[in-house]
Image (spheres, helix red, strand yellow):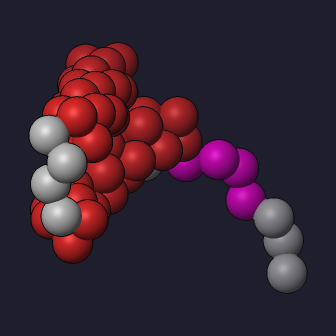
């Protein structure tokens, strides 16, 4: 089985957009968790941050890989 080269299907603009979305979602999650801790809200409500955390991580990893 031959090894193929790395395929990049994102342009510079798409990579930048995904990276910015990833960083923004990371900041939203961090700020939200700090506020949740300061206001002593139930821990189960922190599950609401799973989707933004997933989107942020996906954006950063896609920007790095260029896919």
Judge whether 57 appears above or below 20 on screen: below
Is residue 37 something one can see in this rendering? yes
The image quadrant where one finds the N terminus is bottom right
Does residue 14 show up magenta in the picture? no
Q: How many marks?
A: 0
**Which residue is found at the position 71% from the left and 50% from the top?**
5
Answer with the quarter of the image where residue 44 lies.
Answer: bottom left
Answer with the quarter of the image where residue 16 lies.
Answer: top left
Q: Position of residue 60 (x, y in %)?
A: 42, 37
Q: Position of residue 48 (x, y in %)?
A: 15, 62
Q: Nearer the viewer, residue 8 or 21?
A: 21
| Range of magenta residues | 4-9
Q: Position of residue 19 (x, y in %)?
A: 34, 27
Q: Nearer the viewer, residue 27 or 63?
A: 27
Is residue 22 something one can see in this rendering? no
Q: Nearer the viewer, residue 64 or 39?
A: 39
**Which residue is found at the position 84% from the left and 71% from the top?**
2
């Amino acid at each position: 089985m031959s090894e193929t080269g790395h395929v990049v299907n994102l342009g510079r603009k798409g990579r930048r957009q995904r990276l910015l979305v990833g960083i923004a979602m990371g900041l939203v999650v961090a700020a939200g968790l700090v506020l949740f801790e300061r206001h002593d809200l139930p821990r189960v409500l922190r599950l609401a941050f799973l989707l933004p955390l997933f989107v942020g991580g996906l954006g950063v990893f896609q920007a790095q890989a260029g896919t």
